[in-house]
Amino acid sequence: MDLLYTVAIILVILWLLGVVGSVTIGSLIHVLLVIAIIIVLLRVIQGKRPW
């Protein structure tokens, strides 16, 4: 697996924990998830495989 794919899975798991857990930690996870989505979109726009 590619490093980006692994990071995306970890961020999704942390995001789900953040939804259930604290509001402060949840906000941080949402920001990290948005950053990960932007990175994947940039890779797609540049013509690279996102995974």
Image (cartoon, grey):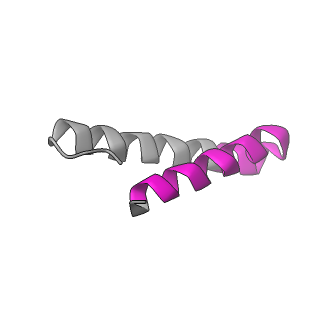
Percent of width and height locating residue 48: 19, 46
**Residue at left offset 19%, top offset 36%:** 45
Q: Is residue 36 above or below residue 45?
A: below
Q: Position of residue 51 (x, y in %)?
A: 36, 48
Residue displayed at 53% across by 44% down: 33
> Residue 16: x and y, percent?
72, 41
Q: Nearer the viewer, residue 29 or 47?
A: 47
As drawn, the residue found furthest toward the front would be 1
- 6 or 40: nearer the eye? 6
Most extreme residue toward the left is: 47
* Magenta extent: 4-28
The residue furthest right is: 21
Question: Does the magenta run of residues contain 12?
Answer: yes
Tell me: residue 2, above or below residue 49: below
Position of the N terminus by quadrant: bottom left
Q: Is residue 49 left or right of residue 14?
A: left
Residue drawn 83% across the image and 47% down it: 22
Count how many numbered circles sit on residues in the image: 0
* Identity of the residue drawn at 15% across and 42% down: 46
Q: Is 3 rendered above or below residue 35?
A: below
Characterize the magenta stretch by its predominant secondary structure.
helix
Kindly indicate the quadrant of the structure image that contains residue 15. top right
Where residue 49 sits, quadrant-wise, is top left
Check the image and name the residue furthest to the bottom. Answer: 3
